[in-house]
Image (spheres, rainbow, N blue to C red):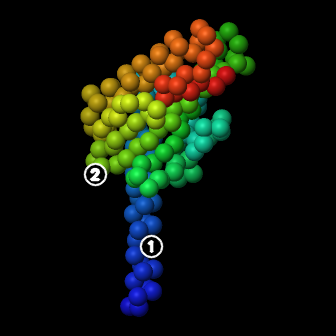
Amino acid sequence: MSKYQELSKAFAESGQRQTKYISDCCDFANFLFQKVAEYFEWPGDQMCFVLDESLYVGPQRCDTTVVRLKEDGYVYFFVLSTVKRLDNVNRSYQFIMPIKLKKFEETFLIQIINSSEELMLKTTDTEELEKFYEYIEAIEELAHAVWHPIGLEPRTGIDVHL
């Protein structure tokens, strides 16, 4: 095998490993945010994944089109959760969670960007998953307490769009 062929083979194998890594991270994100939706009793069609926080609609499942793998080994994406007002269904709010996720064998390190806490999670550890749900709930409550009464956008890791 020539040096070129060896390099070409190594490049192809690297690309396959990267694709598998991103796929594993997306599979975990899909599992995790399905559980988040169940925990909050959030309608599945009111939650989506996007690559850029300026987008207001995206697929309801994480895939390679909505994530960015950066040099630090984290996969970055945004989760948009829409809340429709009960008194006016034509008005809605979007909570935008910037997420970074990194795989370590069978566990995943997740962080809502701009927040200080990182959690190591795996699909089989329901206690740690519960901590993540509570973490999201605490951030949303803080965002509402600060943002809603005075009309400011929160800077706690979750942005709100009207």
Indicate the quadrant where residue 59 lies. top right
Q: Position of residue 125 (x, y in %)?
A: 26, 34
Q: Which residue position holds label 1?
A: 12
Q: Position of residue 16 (x, y in %)?
A: 43, 66
Instruction: Give the side of residue 9 with respect to residue 88, left or right.
Output: left
Q: Secondary structure at mark 2?
A: loop
Q: Secondary structure at mark 1?
A: helix
Q: Position of residue 131 (x, y in %)?
A: 32, 26
The reply to whether residue 77 is visible in this rendering is: yes
76, 80: nearer the viewer: 76
The answer to whether 10 is drawn above or below residue 142 in the figure is: below
Tell me the kind of residue under disc 2: Glu
Tell me the kind of residue under disc 1: Ala
Q: Position of residue 83 (x, y in %)?
A: 60, 21
What residue is rendered at 57% in x and 45% in y? Answer: 51
Count neighbours of disc 1 (C-alpha within 10 A) and say few if under 14, some if 14 to 19, many if 20 or more: few
What residue is rendered at 42% in x and 80% in y? Answer: 7
Count neighbours of disc 2 (C-alpha within 10 A) and say few if under 14, some if 14 to 19, many if 20 or more: few
Residue 105 marker: 2
The reply to whether residue 40 is visible in this rendering is: no
Single out the residue that lies furthest toward the right. 90
How far apart marks 1 and 2 lie (CA) works out to: 22 Å
Residue 68 marker: none
Which quadrant would the C terminus be assigned to in this image? top right
